[in-house]
C-alpha cells in the first residue's frame, strides 16, 4: 500500500456550554483513546481525493436545508450499519436478503439512502473510484453532527464496502424499542460501549421519530402521557411520533429532561431511568447540554471505530455489488493511480 501518514489527529472538544451546578468530568475522561482499526487512517484519502470533505459537507448542508429529517436519518443509518458488524455500508445493499428488509431497519429514510449514493457519484466523478460508500456514510454522518453544533470527531477512513448484507442474527443485536435496561446494557457492552455511551447515543432520539408499532406496548411511568400516545395512534395508525416531544427538530438535551418527567416515548427510552448508573447519566445530560454534546461526539467516535472485516470492494453503486471486473479490492493500487 502506498505510504500514508498514520498520525491520528487529536480529537478537539469544542463548544462546551457553561457548566451548571453539576460537577463536570475532565476533558481527558471524555476523550478516551480508541484503537484505530488495522489498515485505516484518518487521512487515507488525502492524496487521492483531497477535496473529499468539502464535497461531503456541501452535499449534507444542501440536504439539511431541504429536509429536516436528514440528521436523524443519517444518525440512524450509521448506527444500524455499524453496530451489527462494523461500518461497512452493508445496510445500503438492496435485494431479497437486504438489511433494509429486516424489521429492525424499518423506516430507514429513503432520502438519506439516496443522499449517500448521490455523494458517491459526485466523489467518484471528481476522484475516480477511490472512496467507499462506507467512508462516505461515516463522513456524511460526522458532517451532520457538526452541522448540529456538536463537536467534531475523527473517523477512520479506508474502509471497504461489504460484499454481502449482515445476517439476520447480526442485525438482531440492534437494540429494540421494548428492550429493558439489562438488555440494553448487555448489547452495548458486547460491542465495547459502557453505560455512559449507551445513554449518550440514546440522546440521538432528540431528533428521531417512531412508528406507532414501536411504542404499542409502552407502559409504566406517566400514565397520562401513555394515554395520549395511544389516543394519537388510535386516530392515525400511520402516525410518526416525535421521540422528543418538546423540541423535536432541534438537537439538544431536552430528550433527557423528558425522561425525567416520564415522557419517553419508547420503553427502551424510559429503561434508561431504571438503573442507578444510567439514570445518573440521564440526569447529568439533562442538566448540562455541553456535557451531553461532548460525550455524544466521543461515543460517535467509538461507533465509527468499531472493527469490521474490511474485506470487500469500493462499490460503483452503493446499492449493489460491482459486476465482474468492476471490483476494487486493492485500494493501494487505485490510491497510487490518482496520487
Image (cartoon, grey):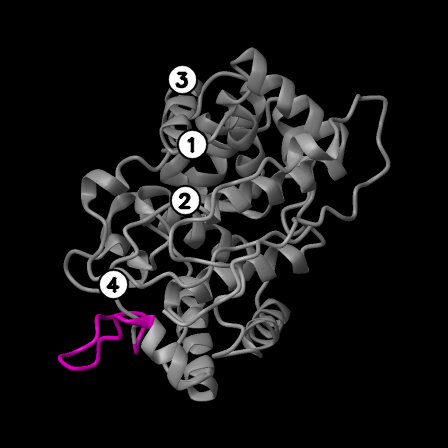
Pointer 2 with pointer 4, Cβ within 8 A: no
Element type at mark 2? loop
Mark 3 or mark 4: name the one nearer the start of the chain: 3
Q: Residues within 10 Å of mark 3 (few under 14, many from 20)?
A: few
Mark 3 highlights which residue? Answer: 182
Q: Is residue 278 magenta?
A: no
Q: Is residue 324 above or below residue 179?
A: below
Q: Which numbered disc covers residue 312?
A: 4
Q: Of the two numbered discs 1 and 4 on the same chain, state the one appearing first in sequence.
A: 1
Whichever of callouts 3 and 2 sits on the residue coming sooner in the sequence is: 3
Q: Is residue 164 above or below residue 130?
A: above
Q: Position of residue 108 (x, y in %)?
A: 38, 55
Q: Are marks 3 and 4 in contact (CB under 8 Å)?
A: no
- First in sequence, mark 1 or 3: give its number: 3
Task: Confirm or deny contact between disc 2 and disc 1 (CB under 8 A).
Answer: yes
Structural distance between the alpha carbons of marks 1 and 4 = 24 Å
Range of magenta residues: 316-331
In the rendered structure, which disc, 2 or 4, sits on the residue that comes first in sequence? 2
**Residue to which mark 2 is pinned:** 306
Residue 276, visible in the rendered structure: yes
Residue 192, numbered circle? 1
Q: Residue farthest to the bottom?
A: 125
Q: Residues within 10 Å of mark 4 (few under 14, many from 20)?
A: some
Note whether 155 is above or below 123 in the view shown.
above
Q: What is the x, y in percent for residue 26?
A: 75, 29
Which quarter of the rendered picture does the N terminus lie within? Answer: bottom left
Q: Assess whether mark 3 and mark 1 are in contact (beta carbons under 8 angstroms).
A: no
SS label for mark 4: loop
Q: Which of these two is toward me, 7 or 302?
A: 7
Residue at x 67%, y 30% (from the top left corner): 29
Amino acid at each position: 500500500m502506498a505510504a500514508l501518514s498514520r498520525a491520528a489527529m487529536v480529537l478537539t472538544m469544542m463548544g462546551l456550554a457553561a457548566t451548571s451546578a453539576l460537577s463536570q468530568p475532565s476533558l481527558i475522561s471524555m476523550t478516551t483513546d480508541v484503537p484505530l482499526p488495522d489498515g485505516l487512517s484518518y487521512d487515507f484519502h488525502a492524496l487521492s481525493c483531497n477535496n473529499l470533505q468539502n464535497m461531503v459537507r456541501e452535499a449534507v448542508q444542501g440536504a439539511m436545508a431541504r429536509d429536516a429529517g436528514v440528521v436523524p436519518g443519517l444518525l440512524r443509518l450509521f448506527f444500524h450499519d455499524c453496530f451489527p458488524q462494523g461500518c461497512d455500508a452493508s445496510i445500503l445493499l438492496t435485494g431479497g436478503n437486504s438489511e433494509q428488509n429486516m424489521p429492525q431497519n424499518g423506516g430507514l429514510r429513503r432520502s438519506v439512502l439516496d443522499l449517500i449514493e448521490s455523494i458517491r457519484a459526485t466523489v467518484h466523478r471528481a476522484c475516480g473510484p477511490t472512496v467507499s460508500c462506507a467512508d462516505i456514510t461515516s463522513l456524511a454522518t460526522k458532517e451532520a453532527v457538526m452541522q448540529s453544533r456538536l463537536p467534531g470527531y475523527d473517523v477512520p477512513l479506508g474502509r471497504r464496502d461489504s460484499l454481502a448484507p449482515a445476517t439476520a442474527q447480526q442485525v438482531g443485536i440492534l437494540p429494540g424499542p421494548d428492550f429493558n435496561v439489562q438488555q440494553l446494557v448487555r448489547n452495548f457492552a458486547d460491542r465495547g460501549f459502557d453505560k455512559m455511551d449507551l445513554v449518550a447515543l440514546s440522546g440521538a432520539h432528540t431528533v428521531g421519530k417512531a412508528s406507532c408499532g414501536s411504542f404499542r406496548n409502552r407502559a409504566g411511568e406517566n400514565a397520562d402521557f401513555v394515554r395520549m400516545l395511544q389516543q394519537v395512534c388510535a386516530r392515525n395508525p400511520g402516525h410518526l411520533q416525535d421521540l422528543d416531544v418538546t423540541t423535536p427538530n432541534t438537537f439538544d438535551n431536552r430528550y433527557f429532561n423528558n425522561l425525567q418527567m416520564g415522557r419517553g416515548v419508547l420503553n427502551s427510552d424510559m429503561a434508561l431511568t431504571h438503573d442507578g448508573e444510567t439514570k445518573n447519566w440521564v440526569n447529568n445530560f439533562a442538566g448540562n447540554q455541553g456535557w451531553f454534546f461532548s460525550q455524544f461526539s466521543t461515543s460517535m467516535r467509538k461507533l465509527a471505530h468499531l472493527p469490521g472485516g474490511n474485506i470487500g470492494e469500493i462499490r460503483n453503486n452503493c446499492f449493489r455489488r460491482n459486476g465482474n471486473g468492476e471490483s476494487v479490492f486493492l485500494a493501494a493500487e487505485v490510491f497510487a493511480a490518482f496520487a
